[in-house]
Amino acid sequence: MFGRQFSYTSTHDWPHIKSWLTLRMQPDMSVEGKVREVMNKISKSGDEALVEYTRLFDCEDFSLENLRVTQTEIQDSMSMIPGNDLKIIRTAAEKIRNYHLKQTRNSWFTTDPDGAFLGQMVTPLPRAGLYVPGGQGGDTPLISSLLMNAIPAQVAGVESICMVSPPRKDKTLNPYLLATAHLLGLDEIYKCGSAWAVAALAYGTPEIPAVDMIAGPGNIFVTTAKKLLMGQVGIDMIAGPSELAVLADSSARPDYIAADLLSQAEHDPLAGTYLVTDDADLIEKVAHELENQLLSLPRADNARKALKDWGGSFEVPDMQTGMELVNRIAPEHFELCLQDPWPMLARVKNAGAVFLGHTSPEPVGDYFAGPNHVLPTLGTARFSQALSVENFQKNISILATDKSYLQQHASGIARLARMENLEAHARSVEIRLKGE
């Protein structure tokens, strides 16, 4: 069932594997021109262009009056959701919030032996915009995306948070999204999507005030817009299709592994699924299980294509070599399906999130346990990390020095400035000592 089968015994085998993985990383440049056109139009025409694009792609009779979700719509959504579903969403939100509360940082201040007052002030970004994809025309609300993006922003202390999501054909948003927003205390919600929504958040329009940070997943148009806006507004990350690597030994259950691989493969035909093991029989058993489980999977077409194009099995001589390969792949999600996974944890160098043991499937983290599911993809876990509270904060350096400090260090500071041929820098320090 796996599209590709590899043997990895040492670093000499990596170039062949890397060349295959790199094919999945090729950017789609065909949409960039279209996205630039959208962004320029939003920049110039604001709400008028926003309504025009929404009419063209989402609902034909959309008007400016429909753009902002009313408080009545938000309140009414609560009665449309079964009580047990609301309870589950509340529980997930609580667990996610508790996890992210542990990420909070404090400002700090100190003095050095020479008397300088030094510090770092941690402050939240003033305003954030959250993008929530429509999902199958609004019929599959991405509740978890809203939870995972809103909660770290709230924990960071962001005072102004808005949400955008493409409307359904009847000019509504899915009540599950609105109810989740209500549970989180979000009441600034706009019905718009794709690149035009991202541009509106970045540039601002008369109806949508500009934000300082944009977070949330989306299709290639959303991702491209965020990429083009980097440097003008904060961006969570440029994420690609989802991926999962599983390092398994003979203790692993083939049906478990197949189910986990399919949980990623159903996302997108570009999703990457990788099984790394020293047990050749396990590869065959998992492949057989994949075929069996695909028969009853609603999104079987997506999953089958993903497995065919970007599913790979990797036979390794031992778990240490397997771990070496996984670190080179640097997967978004990484499951250690081993009899005793804990000793191997210290060997993990590159992964977005790690799931340990046979009873820790990736969806537990995707939805419920607490860690953020917005993770680096396409090998960027080598230098990037999960969305966190820190993404919605910034550090401001603090410095105060008195005349005695300058008397002690002015000559050295001025000399460093002149080494760089920056005379005004040197004089800025020296002028404060004249007349002493």
Image (cartoon, helix red, strand yellow):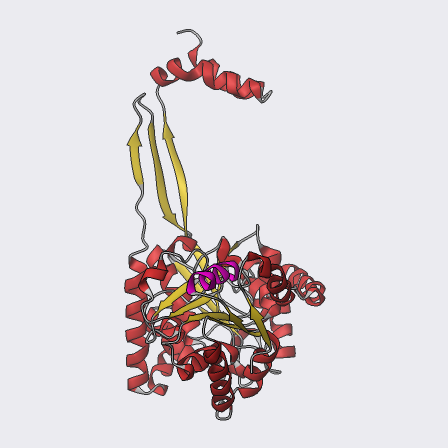
Answer whether residue 158 is visible to the viewer in this image.
Answer: no
Along the horizontal axis of the image, is 13 left or right of 243? right
Q: Position of residue 400 (x, y in %)?
A: 36, 27
Majority secondary structure in the magenta region: helix
Answer whether residue 279 is visible to the viewer in this image.
Answer: yes
Q: Please, is residue 85 above or below residue 227 in the view?
A: below
Determine the image quadrant of residue 355.
bottom left
Q: Is residue 327 magenta?
A: yes
Count how many numbered circles sit on residues in the image: 0
Q: Quadrant of the N terminus?
A: bottom right
Q: Please, is residue 267 above or below residue 164 in the view?
A: below
Determine the image quadrant of residue 396.
top left
Q: Is residue 429 magenta?
A: no
Residue in the image at 47% along x and 61% along y: 321
Looking at the picture, tell me which residue is in the foreground, 147 or 179: 147
Q: Bounds of the magenta span?
A: 319-329
- Residue lying at the far front of the rendered structure: 317
Looking at the picture, tell me which residue is in the foreground, 294 or 219: 294
- Residue lying at the far bottom of the rendered structure: 296
Q: Please, is residue 429 above or below residue 326 in the view?
A: above
Q: Position of residue 423 (x, y in %)?
A: 57, 18
Q: Quadrant of the C terminus?
A: top left
Residue in the image at 36% along x and 60% along y: 345
Q: Position of residue 74 (x, y in %)?
A: 39, 77
Q: Position of residue 50 (x, y in %)?
A: 60, 69
